[in-house]
Image (cartoon, rainbow, N blue to C red):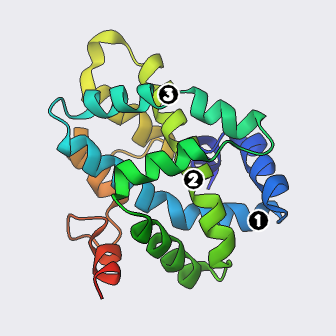
Amino acid sequence: MQQLINALGGAEGIAAMARELGVDQGMVEKGAAALLPAVLGGFKQQATAQPDGLSGLIGMLGKMGGGGLLDAVLGSDPTPVEKGKSLLGQIFGSEDVSHKVAEHAANQTGVSADILKQMLPMVTMAAAGFMSKQAAAAPADSGGGGLIGSVISALTGGRKQEGGGLGAVASLIDMDGDGNPLNDIMKLVNR
């Protein structure tokens, strides 16, 4: 849980989201824990779709605000969620998928889907900002595997992941273990 909190800007990020949403911090932690795997899955899909892979994803995140996205979640009230919604459009492709992600998380957690829909752009911005800051802090010669290793290490508390690179991200974010973290949500959208 501490790794999740760190990825969302630490206790300060959780508290900022809770204040803005008018809910307690435990609800934010529970909701974010359910939303983050789909967000990371969307980032993974974007990285595999980019011609430059992970560096292309990091470049896209940089154009959308980079590390400033996390800073905006921490320092703005209200959070400028337009950037988060734009990111969601990039990684999920449609607002319907975002709504299904929130509904799926609500079914898992008991947290209101309305609260989760408001939280989703904030969680996306925080995760994107966290990844961008990790990329900026990674040594220049570490390549994508080093960056992904840093992000995974931060999110998993240093546990080693099999495969390295995007394979490690996939193992971290694949909810049902079938190699595609968004497929269950996409099935719901296409019903």
Q: Report which residue position mark 2 lands on.
A: 121
Q: Amino acid at mark 1?
A: Gly
**Disc 2 and disc 1 in contact, CB within 8 angstroms:** no
**Disc 2 and disc 3 in contact, CB within 8 angstroms:** no
Q: How far is disc 3 from disc 1 in space, using C-alphas? A: 27 Å
Of callouts 3 and 1, the N-terminal one: 1
Q: Position of residue 56 (x, y in %)?
A: 26, 30
The quadrant of the picture occupied by the C terminus is bottom left
Q: Residue at x 57, y 53 (%)?
A: 121
| Relative to 33, 91 lies left or right | left
Under tag 3, what secondary structure? Answer: loop
Q: Residue at x 27, y 27 (%)?
A: 55
Q: How far is disc 2 from disc 1 in space, using C-alphas? A: 18 Å
Under tag 2, what secondary structure? Answer: helix
| Relative to 10, 145 lies left or right | left
Q: From what the image shows, is residue 175 above or below residue 45?
A: below
Dot 3 alpha-carbon crowd within 10 angstroms: few under 14, some 14 to 19, many 20 or more: many
Q: Which quadrant holds residue 147? A: top left
Q: Position of residue 35 (x, y in %)?
A: 52, 63
Q: Report which residue position mark 1 lands on.
A: 26
Tell which residue pokes out farthest to the top in this image: 140
Q: Amino acid at mark 3?
A: Gly
Q: Position of residue 59 (x, y in %)?
A: 34, 26
Q: Position of residue 123 (x, y in %)?
A: 58, 51
Q: Amino acid at mark 2?
A: Pro
Tell which residue pokes out farthest to the left in this image: 51
Q: Report which residue position mark 3 lands on.
A: 66
